[in-house]
Amino acid sequence: MLKSNLPKLALLVLSIVFLSVVTAFAQRASCALEVETELKNGILIKGARASAVNVKSKRLYRSVMRNGTPYFAKLPEGRYNLTVTKPGFKQSKDSYVVVCADAEDGVLSALVPMVKGSPRQIYAVQQAGTRWIVGTRLGSENINPPPRTENLPVTGNDELPPPPKPTQTPRRVPKIISKGVVNASAVILPKPNYPPAAKAVRAAGTVPVQVTIDENGNVISASAAGGHPLLQQAAVGAARQAKFRPTLLSGTPVKVTGIIVYNFVAQ
């Protein structure tokens, strides 16, 4: 009787282990997202709300308010369509890829520009080329704290010291920015070759390539993030030859991570 149930017990144990591994992986592949909104002149906007839709699963995530800004407690890695709204402003819409490896202490920060207007109007951020996601919280540290003063006794000949001048907290410039699809910002974007092996089986479809772009706009790393296996090597080879406009944040060149999307048509 025991021998006959051993295969079932073994299968049950393997199933439990597999589910545990999948659950642990899912937890590691999720991170928080803090959304900051601003006008084009850099003035921060408080009180906006945001929602994110996972492109693959179609699941809707709604933000909560934290410190006057929209906040997502947990977003699985993947590509999202983000909508930010506030009365008196157009809807800011964008598409990007959440990469938790770029998060600082498990939190990504998105800086989304907004434009005044009717909430019924849409402002396509990606078409305007002004969207970025950073792996650090902007303005979260007081880099230049005000000088410390002490209460000193005052005599007839003493004068009170002048009050300290208020200091502004400079915005921290991250070392790397995580964007979504970067095809539109390419200066040179070579087309990949259609491999003979792929042609033999008429392989086709979309191949996304994860790239890292340095401060000069050169691709310094590239790896396939999906697509047909016979097409991935050709897509990666083409991505390594791409050239982009340097990305400036507060006047400082920064590295960028993003996705180059290649579409292969069967020949």
Image (cartoon, helix red, strand yellow):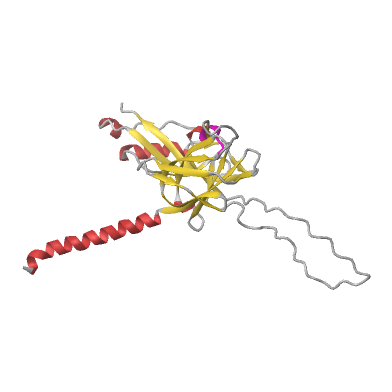
Left or right: 10 as drawn, with respect to 182: left
Q: In the rendered image, is residue 213 in sight?
A: no
Which image quarter is the N terminus in?
A: bottom left
What residue appears at the point 46 percent right and 43 percent down from the top-left corner?
A: 51
Which image quarter is the C terminus in?
A: top left
Q: Is residue 95 above or below residue 134?
A: above
Residue 73: say if magenta: no
What residue appears at the point 89 percent right and 66 percent down from the top-left corner?
A: 159
Q: Is residue 10 above or below residue 60?
A: below
* Quadrant housing residue 131: top right
- Residue 89: percent from the left, percent from the top? 57, 36
Query: Where are the magenta residues, as a range?
Result: 126-130
In this view, the residue in front, 258 or 172, is 172
Name the residue furthest left. 1
Left or right: 50 as drawn, with respect to 37: left
Q: Is residue 152 above or below residue 66?
A: below
Q: Is residue 218 above or below residue 104?
A: above
What residue appears at the point 79 percent right and 70 percent down from the top-left corner?
A: 151
In this view, the residue in front, 213 or 175, is 175
Left or right: 65 as drawn, with respect to 162: left
In this view, the residue in front, 112 or 66, is 66
- Residue 116: percent from the left, percent from the top? 60, 34
